[in-house]
Image: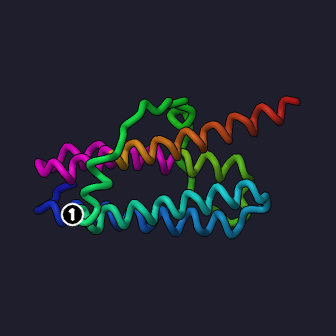
Amino acid sequence: MKFGSVDEILSFAIDREKEAVDFYSSLAKEATRTSLKEIFEKFAKEEENHVILLSDIAGNKEKIDSYEFKKITDLKISDYMVETEYEEGMPMPEILKLAMKREEKAVKLYSILADKTDNEDVKKVFMILVQEESKHKLALESMYDDYLADQDN
């Protein structure tokens, strides 16, 4: 990835977040269980908030400065999965695998983008997004793990 400016980096990241909003919104519409619908709607809303954060870093400076980083556990479940394409009517475990992989890629992407800028505010925003996407990945991996555990009973 080559970028000519911080604005190009931000524009690229905003596009990825908008794709994530669409992805989770479509999963929420298709979800047959209320709990999954709510989780996917929550993720879509959080991805919308990421768009807002990236779109107006100066306007969100207070929020950025007050963000508290926490250690997020990585279950590494998605590390051992093959990337797949979304197909309407996919079984839930496959949807969870797909979503985990997307979040894993988002974490890697924002880590790379943070390294591509010298702007400290932009760098911090990307590190915030690394953490936020890591939270999504953990939630999805936990749901997948719980799903598999339920199958064993």
Quarter of the N terminus within the rendering: bottom left
Which sits in the foreground, 65 or 92?
A: 65
Q: Is 140 a magenta residue?
A: no
At 56% from the left and 51% from the top, the residue drawn is 99
Residue that carries the numbered disc 1 in the rendered image: 58
**Residue at horizontal 64%, vertical 48%?**
96
**Residue depicted at 64% across the width and 55% down the height:** 39
Magenta stretch: give its range: 101-127
Name the residue rendered at 40%, 49% in the picture.
106
Looking at the image, residue 44 sits to the left or right of residue 38; the answer is: left
Magenta residues, dominant SS class: helix
User: In x, y percent, where is residue 91?
Assistant: 74, 53
Q: Say which element carries label 1.
A: loop
Dividing the picture into quadrants, the one containing residue 4 is bottom left
- In which quadrant of the rendered image does the C terminus lie? top right
Residue 113: image x %, image y %?
A: 25, 49
Q: Is residue 99 left or right of residue 152?
A: left
Placement of 79 over or under 59, stated as above or below: above
Q: Is residue 82 visible?
A: yes
The amino acid type of the residue labelled 1 equals Ala
Give the answer, above or below, for where 80 lies relative to 18: above
How is the structure coloured here? rainbow
Query: Which of the two residues, 70 or 65, is positioned nearer the viewer here?
Result: 65
Q: Quadrant of residue 80?
A: top right
